[in-house]
Image: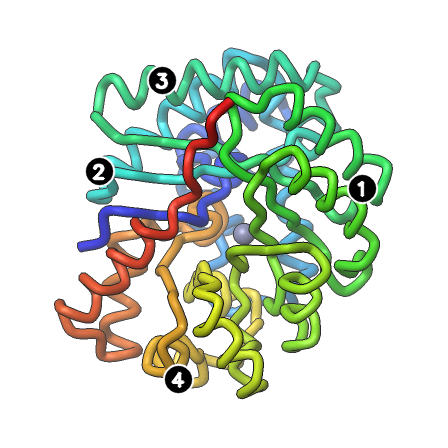
Amino acid sequence: MLTTELHRHLDASLRPDTLAELIRAQGVHPTLRTTEDIKEKFWITKPMGSLKEVLDCFVLFQKVLTTETILERVARETIEDVAREGIKTVELRYSPSFVSEYSQLDWRLALGAIERGISMGSKATGVQARLICIISRDYGSNTADKTVDFAVAHKESFVALDLAGNEVDYPNPIFAGALRRARDAGFSITVHSGEATGPETVWQAIDELGAQRIGHGIHSIKDPELVKRLVRDRIHLEVCPTSNVNTRSVASWGEHPLRRLFDAGVRVSINTDDPGIFGVGLDEEVARAKKAFGFSEPELATINSMAFEDLFKVREI
Ligand SMILES: [Zn+2]
């Protein structure tokens, strides 16, 4: 069993019954009305057309995450869920710009609500949770700058900055300035990269954006020099196998490179990415990884240790 998770989007972790309830209350979708509707019509449980198609599903979360009360509840429920999956330490991430785009909720109030929910959940379960602040690629460089300013102004709330979203249309170099300022302010950096793109984007994330961890990064396997670099500099890949298969970042479980990356000595973890979209908790994710990659219990223990050791450190303020 894995007890540490590094890559889980809080704003895409809604329980199906909560999501259905919020949709009904707010009348934001004509056909998704029950828990079964969410499981059958919304969850992506098999490979989709593309990563872009999957990213489009996130709009529904924006439409229901509209108040402080709702954000507090979703954060609390997420902690309860991770506890049930056996997780003791989790880094949750969310994008302030994404969460507030539809509701226009003040970023500060949204963060406060999320922190209250996490705190309630942690008190009830004993789960240790930390927050990563996401810069959403799709809103461009001005919003990236605004997000860094927000994180710097709330340094005590976040352990790191992340860059996420559509990497093809909003490539890494656009965000070099914003992430340099984040690093200068003392933040650790993780970057979603090499998910639907090739190894060259992972090189950029490391060399131009200063990433210490990479979200996904699975296409690094195509470049032996890059694999060597990841091993040498202990750059961690936050791998999310179900997400990778269902967004068609890889063609199949059989072609997923997690086993080869692990065998090459790359530091890796297993993560759920978006439980509210893929309908999978970490316990199920591990069961699938065991089956697909033949990981033994000692190997899973090694993966768990790598996740724990590569948690972002809480900075001195
Ligand atoms: Zn992600």
Cα–Cα gap, marks 4 and 1: 35 Å
Q: Which residue is mark 1?
A: 139
Q: Residues within 10 Å of mark 1 (few under 14, many from 20)?
A: some
Could you say where residue 161 lies in the image, as x and y percent from the top left?
60, 40
Residue that appears at 72% across and 32% down: 147
Residue on which disc 3 sits: 119
Disc 2 crowd, CA 10 A, few/some/many (<14, 14-19, 20+)? some
Label 3 or label 4, whichever comes before in sequence order = 3
> Circle 2 sits on which residue?
84
Q: Quadrant of the N terminus?
A: bottom left
Q: Nearer the viewer, residue 104 or 15?
A: 104
Above or below residue 93? Residue 44 is below
The residues bearing labels 3 and 4 have C-alpha atoms spaced at a distance of 40 Å
Q: Nearer the viewer, mark 3 or mark 4?
A: 3
How many residues crowd mark 4 within 10 Å: few (<14), some (14–19), many (20+)? few
Give, as a three-letter code, the residue at label 2. Arg
Front-lying residue, 11 or 233: 233
Q: Label 2, label 1: how many angstroms apart (C-alpha)?
A: 35 Å
Name the image quarter holding residue 98. top right
Quarter holding residue 270:
bottom left
15 on left or right of 178: left
Q: Are marks 3 and 4 in contact (CB under 8 Å)?
A: no
Marks 2 and 3: which is nearer the front?
3
Image height check: is 288 above or below 2?
A: below
Q: Percent position (x, y) of residue 251?
A: 52, 81
Give whichever of 297, 274 is nearer the camera.
297
Q: Are marks 2 and 1 in contact (CB under 8 Å)?
A: no
Q: x and y percent of residue 216 in the render?
A: 52, 63
